[in-house]
Amino acid sequence: MDYETAVGSLFQLEGREDPYPAYDVIRAHAPAAPAMEDQWFISSHALVSRLLRDPGLRVADKFDYDQFWPTWRENRGVASVVLSMLQTNPPDHSRVRRAAASTFTARRVAAMREVIAAQAGELIDEMPVEADFMSAFAYPLPIGVICSLLGIPESERRWFRRRAADLTVVLEPISTEEEMGRADKAGRELEDYFIGLVADRRRTPREDLTSALVEAASADDAVLTGAELLANLVLLLVAGFETTTNLLGTGLKILLEHPSQADRLRTDPSLAPNFVEEILRYDSPVQLTSRFATAPVDLDGVQVGAGAMMMILLGAANRDPARYPDPHRFDPDRPNIQPVSFGGGAHYCLGAPLARLEAQVAFPLLLSRLPGLALAGEPVRRDRLTLRGYSSLPVTAAS
């Protein structure tokens, strides 16, 4: 296909089903290739890695939204994302990120290993022989884990799945009016829930992430406003669930399509970290992010001015042959796998260590406890460009 066809295919259902041929064409055209006026597709691993870490670039924030969509706050799904650290720039981003990072610590994440293993084991025990892996495992495990961290009762966790799924459409570059309506409804319901949870934790703090964030927002020298607290609680729930769900579903399908590799992981769970990194590289759960120039930027020989938008194709960078020889081959033995799937720099995904840990625990458990696990039908991929994953993945789960 030619360059224009490749770009157009990303905005069509068929092209989003398998965007990698289009990424190859775009990357071959130029590491920084023109999209629309003053917009650029960034597709090489080297340039993507550099731009993600460039402090001179910014994300679209509430001030930008005020310019092109003055009524954006009326959609509470949009508001919960725009007011979170995901769509915030320094100095506010630095302040909010420090507060969140001080509560979402490496120690707190590492302590979740036993919780993850226990929840994964229960889900495996309950999995029917003929199952939709997404419904039976890939959705409930991340929801259960992030809800455990936030201190949300087990009886209320199922309620979050639909709302989290509906809200994430606001991260997509294209959406329908109906989808945005569902995102608004989900945002309002999640805000209402967290208002109640925050009030409860102010009265009775517990050893959970919500209490820690409430403390950060309630101190005399509060580092979080009330609106920021609510927005980032919604973000932690939705991001902590959606990305990991996609990683689990995509990862299992890849493993079952490569039975000799699955056998290796089944036999030696210590291989899990490398397997998970290669899954993240091979088919990233997040395919796209964006940045804006605050000053002129050199895009590998292409000079762009302040205000230019860079659509950063994470999935293309992860399969750049200049960085990964034979990039379309799944190979967990690759040296120095460093996928850009969780971004980089100041906006590197705060929940990346937790997502990795869940996958590292889950895949060996699934393969060892269910040695007969196999694909049992045609999976259904969600029609998304930014967040890539399955809505349904039929499996036979015989032990």
Image: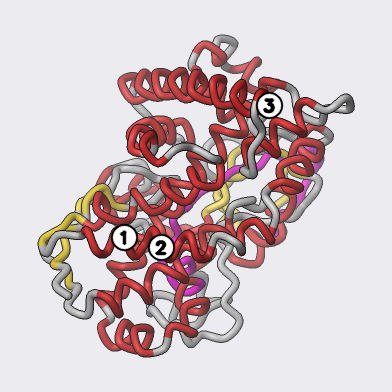
Which stretch did the figure color magenta? 277-301
**96 over 176 or under it: above or below:** below
The residue positioned 67% from the left and 56% from the top of the image is 344
The numbered dot on residue 118 is 2
Q: Hey, which quadrant is residue 386 in on the image?
A: top left
**32 over 36 or under it: above or below:** below
Q: Are marks 3 and 2 in contact (CB under 8 Å)?
A: no
Q: Hey, which quadrant is residue 48 in on the image?
A: bottom right
User: Counting other residues with Cα less than 10 Å from the Cα at mark 1, is it few (<14), some (14-19), or many (20 or more)?
Assistant: few
The numbered dot on residue 122 is 1
Amino acid type, mark 3: Glu
C-alpha distance separating marks 2 and 1: 6 Å
The residue positioned 63% from the left and 38% from the top of the image is 206
Amino acid type, mark 1: Glu
**310 over 259 or under it: above or below:** above
Q: What element does badge 3 sit on?
A: helix
- Number of the front mark, 3 or 2: 2
- Number of the front mark, 3 or 1: 1
Q: Are marks 2 and 1 in contact (CB under 8 Å)?
A: yes
| Circle nearer the N terminus (3, 2) | 2
Amino acid type, mark 2: Ala
| Circle nearer the N terminus (3, 1) | 1
The numbered dot on residue 351 is none
Q: Judge left or right: residue 186 versus residue 62.
A: left
Instruction: Write down the residue under mark 3.
Output: 228
The residue positioned 19% from the left and 56% from the top of the image is 379
- Asked if one can make out residue 342 in the rendered structure from this viewpoint, the answer is yes
